[in-house]
Amino acid sequence: MNKYVDKPAGEESLYADRVRVYPRAVRGIARNVKWALLIFCLSVYYVLPWIRWYRGPGRPDQAVLLDISTERFYFFDVTFWPQDIVLLTGGLILAAVGLFLVTSLFGRLWCGYACPQTVWTDLFMLVERWIEGDRNARMRRDAGPVTLDKVWRKLAKHGIWLFVAFWTGGGWIMYYVDAPTVTMDFWAGRAGAGVYGFTFLFTATTYVLAGWAREQVCTYMCPWPRFQSAMLDEQTLIVTYQGWRGEPRGHGKRDATTAAKLGNCIDCMACVHVCPTGIDIRDGVQLECIGCGLCVDACNDIMDRTGQPRWLIKWDTLARQAELAKGQAVEAIRLIRPRTLIYLSVLAIAVIAMGTGLAMRSLLEVSVQHERAPLFVRLHDGALRNAYTLKLVNKYDYDVNFTITVDGPPRATLQVAGASEVPGSVINIVVPADSVGAYRVFLDVPPGGKEAPNTDINFLLRDTTDGILLKRNANFMGPGARAGG
Ligand code: SF4
Ligand code: SF4
């Protein structure tokens, strides 16, 4: 009977009670790789915000910081500005296509080994096993009456889970605000409501998702399993049960008489009992399988104990398994095929585009806006004055001194509003490091020349350190000019 169907045809329920999964501990290659990745991922997550990176006085010294207040994303030596959103979007596209490529080559490696849901669930299960014991002990205790032993173990488990969840939630906040500062402020009660609110939110999320929801997140909440099937084909390396070798399954010793009738699978259920999603890999490819390979480890152990060849469950392609089932010679694993070539090409294009974009990224940006109300004013000495707003973006980690001239009406003078400098044909503006400056600039043309309603001019801004020249087109308006003209 289908586990989702408990009523006659036409009355099937779309709801199925959760069958609690009690994964058993296992040792082997997949488990060791998972432990190594778990340690690596958690270390990166918890340690990264504490790495300091000097960027100059007055600038954040946190290596990785998404500073919402200043709208900057600091990543070691690179600072991303809101204007660099295209590069960040490109980075996300790069990661997505990389994931498509890995999935099409090796199945759900991401899900089984590096997805945060998997990593934190593994950590929570480790705590659970440490306090409540392995699968059988946990099942026995859960089915039994409430005892002091049961209560203290449950309390201890949930206490440690909450502690881990709290450090995880707090760690997340540290990517947005200076880690040492927010830590001190948090415990001194000086942090903002947002810090406390989001720490609580991420603590609760981690506790619920990794402690309680676990495989339900992968099976029902995550959209990835739904569309990853579009990336898999019969040449993808996935965790697969070699049915042709294992069946007919059955208990009992393999000797000369039974060996001919029974396959290698002794139906011990070890592969099912270690599975974090509680499925039976022998049923074939399933949406719930996250490709963790723990069933491979479990079965290898059983094969060793029963004196049979290892790898009854292994990483292989469906195409090769179909050939093996028919007793045909198997072809080599084909990593290069049209699907992977397409992903590789898109990935290469994205890498080149991103690299070029990053290398060519201008660290100085200038815009000139002509003030519209009024378009011009006549000064008491008869000169015509136009006003402009110059927006100067300095993404360098040092101050930049600009000399500004105008290529336009002869004898025109420039002046920064509110500055003490006398008007002249050249003005200087210093834009502090890592900042945006908006300056109101007057351009005055003395009387005596021919006055046109609209004259094309260019603002020429030269960075005096590097000699970089930036040119921005604008208009100088006179009598007869119309707004928008
Ligand atoms: S662990 Fe191996 S032998 Fe045991 S049930 Fe699974 S496939 Fe069969
Ligand atoms: S079936 Fe095997 S590979 Fe798939 S989730 Fe379960 S243990 Fe992991």
Image (cartoon, rainbow, N blue to C red):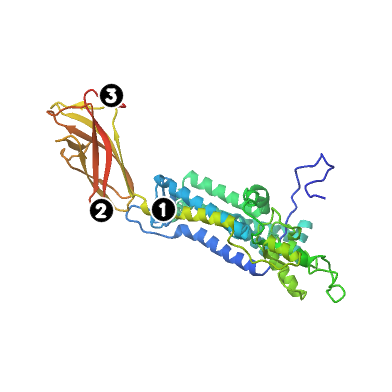
Mark 3: is the Cβ under 8 angstroms from ligand 2? no
Q: From what the image shows, is residue 416 above or below residue 100?
A: above
For marks 3 and 2, the one nearer the N-term is 2
Q: Secondary structure at mark 1?
A: strand
Q: Secondary structure at mark 3?
A: loop
Q: Which residue is mark 1?
A: 74
Front: mark 1 or 2: 2
Give percent across and percent down for residue 63. 42, 57
In the image shown, does 253 or 243 lie closer to the viewer?
243
Q: Which residue is mark 2?
A: 466
In the image shown, does 485 or 138 lie closer to the viewer?
485
How many residues crowd around disc 2 within 10 Å: few (fewer than 14), some, or many (20 or more)?
Answer: few
Residue for point 31% across, 50% down: 433
Give percent across and percent down for residue 389. 28, 36
Q: CA–CA distance between discs 3 and 2?
A: 39 Å
Left or right placement of residue 274 versus residue 261 in this view: left
Among the 4 quarters of the image, the one containing residue 245: bottom right
Among the 4 quarters of the image, the one containing residue 254: bottom right
Q: Verify CB contact (< 8 Å) between mark 1 and mark 3.
A: no
Question: Ligand 1 is found in which quarter of the picture?
Answer: bottom right
In the image as oriented, which residue stretches furthest toward the top?
480
Q: Verify CB contact (< 8 Å) between mark 1 and mark 2.
A: no
Which quadrant: the C terminus?
A: top left
Q: Which residue is mark 3?
A: 482
Residue for point 62% across, 50% down: 224
Among the 4 quarters of the image, the one containing residue 261: bottom right
Give percent across and percent down for residue 253. 84, 73
